[in-house]
């Protein structure tokens, strides 16, 4: 397992793959077997994995309990644990019990700490933007948790970029703990964050965690259920065949080449083992270009206009072109 820094604003080294736990813990929907979930956690650790991502909402809190059970006999400080608040583990929460506000934040972090059997969470995320709570309330509340030693780093997930930018600037201007990492959906079939989120992360030094790296398993399939994806998946398959790998491995290798931290969400031990092998794949520039042309992404207005204007003015090659698709 290779390691990377958690962005450019921390000195924390984490495994290049993150183990996601959204499917861990058998509930009424029967998504996962707890015994196999613990096997997955141990296999990830044995492979050198250190970064585990969970949430109070995953499987009604059972995922956090399993992570806590996994950590208990081990060295807690060998692992980087990320969790999230906003959605709550309750099936029918009261209106005051969920959202981004301080009251929910306090209740959620205390519940997560108990389930995880730890005195601190390494990276604590706002899971979803509720669109209501002021950024000032969110950032001051998270900063208080950092100062209290209950969390170490702040993360934002599934939030509009202007809200993230407001949070980052507010932290800088008011001397609050900075936002160190964002977690967004990112894969070959969902590249929308290349418009603004990726350039913003590069400009601020934030790490980028990519959830749903295989687009819900679509990028791992041999055949395309959606005809719109057929041509692109054919190119993915060609590259996989040439490199004697499978489609999932190539899709994950592309995310690593984009300097992100893919969040693997295996249901089985075999799925985890297959995903981890992608860490040894080095895609050529031609392979990356072929994939990005096949899975075409249009930046749209104003980025296409700005790129054309820069080109017409002869600005190509002069400094960083933040309007180009990465």
Image (spheres, rainbow, N blue to C red):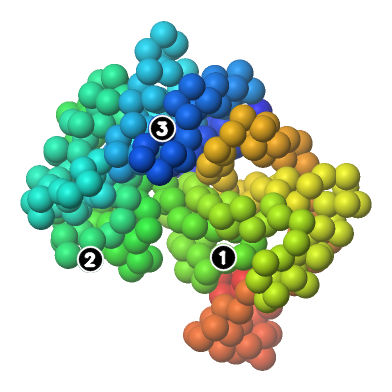
The residue that appears at 60% across and 89% down in the rendered structure is 309
Q: Which residue lies under the disc numbered 3?
A: 25
Closer to the chain start, of discs 1 and 3, is 3
Q: Residues within 10 Å of mark 2 (few under 14, many from 20)?
A: few
Whether residue 169 is visible, yes or no, is no
The residue that appears at 70% across and 75% down in the rendered structure is 227
Figure check: 189 above or below 175: below
162 lies left or right of 201: left
Mark 1 and mark 3: Cα distance apart in space: 27 Å
Mark 1 and mark 2: Cα distance apart in space: 23 Å
Closer to the chain start, of discs 2 and 3, is 3
Residue 190 is marked as 1
Q: Secondary structure at mark 1?
A: loop
Closer to the chain start, of discs 1 and 2, is 2
Figure check: 111 above or below 159: above
* Tags 1 and 3 touching, CB below 8 Å: no
Figure check: 201 above or below 300: above
* Tags 1 and 2 touching, CB below 8 Å: no
* Residue 218 occupies quadrant: bottom right
184 lies left or right of 138: right
Considering depth in this image, is 15 or 170 the residue closer to the camera?
A: 15
The residue furthest top is: 73
Considering depth in this image, is 37 or 109 the residue closer to the camera?
A: 37
Mark 2 or 3, which is nearer the eye?
A: 3
* Location of the N terminus (image quadrant): top right
Q: Which residue lies under the disc numbered 2?
A: 131
Q: Secondary structure at mark 2?
A: loop
Whether residue 30 is visible, yes or no, is yes
Where does the image place residue 246, in percent across and percent down from the top left?
Answer: 79, 47
Considering depth in this image, is 71 or 220 the residue closer to the camera?
A: 220
Figure check: 322 above or below 312: above
């Amino acid at each position: 397992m290779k390691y990377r820094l958690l962005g450019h604003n921390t000195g924390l080294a984490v495994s290049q793959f993150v183990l996601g736990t959204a499917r861990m813990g058998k509930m009424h929907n029967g998504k996962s077997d707890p015994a196999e979930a613990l096997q997955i956690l141990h296999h990830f650790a044995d492979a050198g994995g250190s970064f585990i991502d969970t949430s109070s909402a995953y499987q009604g809190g059972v995922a956090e309990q399993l992570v806590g059970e996994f950590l208990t006999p081990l060295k807690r400080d060998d692992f980087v644990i990320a969790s999230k608040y906003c959605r709550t583990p309750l099936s029918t929460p009261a209106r005051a019990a969920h959202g981004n506000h301080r009251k929910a934040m306090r209740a959620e972090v205390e519940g997560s700490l108990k389930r995880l059997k730890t005195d601190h969470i390494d990276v604590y995320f706002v899971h979803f933007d509720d669109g209501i709570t002021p950024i000032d309330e969110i950032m001051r509340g998270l900063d208080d948790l950092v100062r209290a030693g209950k969390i170490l780093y702040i993360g934002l997930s599934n939030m509009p970029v202007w809200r993230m930018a407001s949070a980052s600037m507010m932290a800088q201007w008011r001397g609050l703990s900075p936002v160190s990492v964002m977690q967004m959906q990112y894969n070959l079939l969902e590249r929308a964050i290349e418009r603004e989120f990726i350039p913003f992360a590069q400009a601020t030094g934030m790490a980028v965690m990519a959830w749903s790296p295989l687009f819900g398993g679509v990028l791992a399939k041999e055949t395309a259920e959606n005809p719109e994806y057929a041509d692109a998946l054919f190119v993915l398959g060609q590259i996989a065949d040439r490199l004697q790998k499978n489609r999932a491995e190539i899709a994950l290798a592309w995310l690593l080449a984009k300097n992100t931290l893919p969040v693997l969400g295996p249901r089985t031990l075999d799925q985890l083992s297959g995903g981890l092998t992608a860490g040894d794949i080095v895609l050529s520039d031609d392979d990356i270009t072929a994939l990005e042309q096949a899975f075409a992404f249009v930046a749209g207005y104003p980025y296409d206009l700005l790129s054309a204007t820069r080109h017409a003015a002869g600005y190509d090659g002069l400094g960083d072109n933040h309007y180009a698709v990465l």
